[in-house]
Image (cartoon, rainbow, N blue to C red):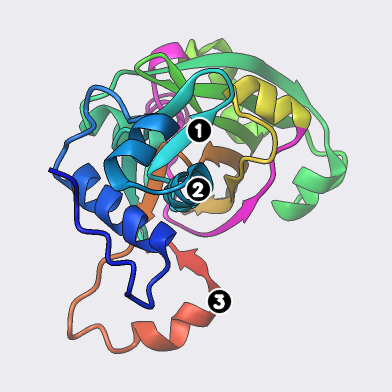
Amino acid sequence: MKPAIDRRSPMPLWSQVSDDLRRRLDAGEFAERFPNDNELMNHYGVSRHTARDAVRRLQDAGLVVRERGRGTHVVTPGLEQPLGTLYSLYRSIEDQGFEQRSTVRFLEERTDAEAAGVLGLSSRARLVYLERVRFADGEPVAVDCSWLPAEVARPLLDVDFTRTALYTELQALCGVRPVSGWERLRPELPSPEQRRLLGLPARQPVFAIERVTSSADGPLEWRHSVIRGDTFAFVARWSGTATSAVSGMESLSVALP
């Protein structure tokens, strides 16, 4: 049975079609495949332009992906990361039932004046640099770059980071862990190299995350990461008693406990 499209309604046809498609997506109707333009035109009795406008709204909302020559595909549920806590991406992925693996691009000792400055160190301070591409069930989800003081983190140079977490190894081998810091998250377009590593089409945005942490003894890590926006969601939860949270929302940053 064809859905009722009310041509007398002030609501545009594309909006009516898009709303009905959202309802059908929520009901799991397109688990196997999403209809093509001709099928949508026949089902809703609308023009190709209207059908494409409706699907474009779903794509803008991150519900479907449209690829030239391959059609439209439903975006599968992605990973969630709660905000407001110090988290391990490795643990977040594993705890949600995915296998986390990393490809290490760089693990070496070097100097970097900018990283040293962020950590409050001398511009000539020796640093351990770790760069990884992070995977969830074989799909690339993030590119992670971490800088740590070499005098603290030098034991990490012998670690195989394919299937382990940085903070786990820091505590086990170096006897330190992050206890305070801050994190900033913003959307941006990835660089061509980041896009290649994550397998992203042109102009698909990512989450850019900057994190600075300290141990009980001093600066510990400066991390900058890009995470795929089509597979990862950051979630904030609060209670009715958290009245102080309202004043902090303007900064759009996450404070670590």
Query: At x 38% / y 86%, what residue is drawn?
Result: 246
In this view, the residue in front, 168 or 236, is 236
Q: Is residue 180 magenta?
A: yes
Query: At x 72% / y 32%, what residue is drawn?
Result: 127
* First along the sequence among labels 2 and 3: 2
Tell me, yes or no, if residue 27 can be seen here: yes
- Quarter of the view holding residue 80: top left
Label 2: element kind: helix
Q: Is residue 183 magenta?
A: yes
33 over 216 or under it: above or below: above
Instruction: State the extent of the magenta-drawn residues as a range.
Output: 162-191
Q: Which mark is residue 56?
A: 2
- Quarter of the view holding residue 194: top right
In this view, the residue in front, 155 or 247, is 247
Image-based side of 235 in relation to 215, left or right: left
Residue 67 position in % (x across, y down): 54, 27
Alpha-carbon span between mark 2 and mark 1? 8 Å
Question: Mark 2 or mark 3: which is in front?
Answer: 2
Residue 201 position in % (x across, y down): 63, 29
**Quadrant in which the N terminus appears:** top left
Q: Which mark is residue 251?
A: 3
